[in-house]
Image (cartoon, rainbow, N blue to C red):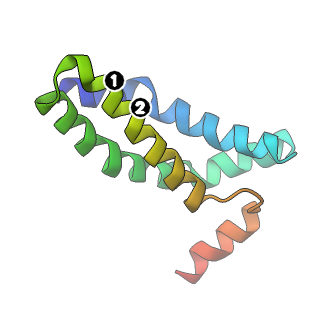
C-alpha cells in the first residue's frame, strides 16, 4: 500500500500526466498557452482515471508478482494505459471540443 501511495500521490502521477498532455499538444503545434489550458482542463479527470486504473494494478503487482517480474507488469500495463489516454484524448482534439463534450454529459 505504501509503494502504491508513494507512486500515485508523490512521485509520478501529476508530473507524468501533465507531461503527457503538454507533449501531445506541443507535437500538434499548439502554443504554450494552449498546452497549459489543455493541462488545466483535463488533468483532474486524468488523475482520477489514473488512480482508478493504476492503484489496483500496483496493489496486485506488489502483493502477488515476484519482484523480478514487477517491472514487466508495469511496462506491459503502461502500454494499455497509454492506449487508453490516446483513446480518451485523441490527437487533434481542441480544448473547446473537450469542454463542449463535458457540457453535453
Task: Please tell me whether mark 1 sits on a helix, a strand or a loop.
Answer: helix
- In the rendered view, does 74 fall on the left or right side of 55? right
Above or below, comparing residue 67 to residue 35 in the picture: above
Label 1 crowd (10 A; few <14 / some 14-19 / many >=20): few
For residue 25, which numbered disc appears in the image? none
In the image, what residue occupies the spot 40% across and 46% down? 50
- Mark 2: secondary structure: helix
Compare residues 32 and 67 and report the one nearer the observer: 67
In the image as oriented, which residue stretches furthest toward the bottom?
104
Q: Residue furthest top?
A: 68
Q: Residue at x 17, y 29 (%)?
A: 65
Instruction: Return the x and y of residue 33 as percentages of the image width and height.
Output: 82, 44
What's the residue at 74%, 62% (across, down)? 93
Check contact, mark 2 vs mark 1: CB within 8 A: yes
Residue 100 pos. (x, y %): 67, 75
Q: Which residue is more in the foreground, 52 or 76?
A: 76
Question: In this figure, which residue is indicated by the disc labeled 1?
Answer: 71
Image quarter of the N terminus? top left
Residue 13 location, quadrant: top left
- Residue that label 2 marks: 75
Label 2 crowding class (10 Å Cα cut-off): few <14, some 14-19, many 20+? few
Relative to 103, say whether 76 is above or below.
Answer: above
Pinpoint residue 52: horizontal percent, then vertical percent.
Answer: 32, 51
Q: CA distance from mark 2 to mark 1?
A: 6 Å
Relative vertical location of residue 71 with respect to residue 36 in this rendering, above or below: above
Residue sitting at x 17%, y 38%: 60
Q: Position of residue 53 (x, y in %)?
A: 34, 49
Amino acid at each position: 500500500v505504501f509503494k502504491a501511495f508513494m507512486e500515485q500521490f508523490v512521485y509520478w502521477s501529476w508530473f507524468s500526466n501533465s507531461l503527457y498532455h503538454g507533449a501531445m499538444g506541443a507535437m500538434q503545434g499548439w502554443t504554450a498557452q494552449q498546452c497549459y489550458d489543455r493541462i488545466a482542463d483535463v488533468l483532474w479527470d486524468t488523475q482520477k482515471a489514473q488512480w482508478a486504473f493504476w492503484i489496483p494494478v500496483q496493489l496486485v503487482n506488489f502483493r502477488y508478482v515476484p519482484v523480478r517480474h514487477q517491472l514487466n507488469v508495469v511496462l506491459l500495463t503502461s502500454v494499455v494505459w497509454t492506449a487508453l489516454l490516446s483513446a480518451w484524448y485523441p490527437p487533434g482534439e481542441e480544448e473547446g471540443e473537450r469542454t463542449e463534450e463535458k457540457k453535453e454529459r
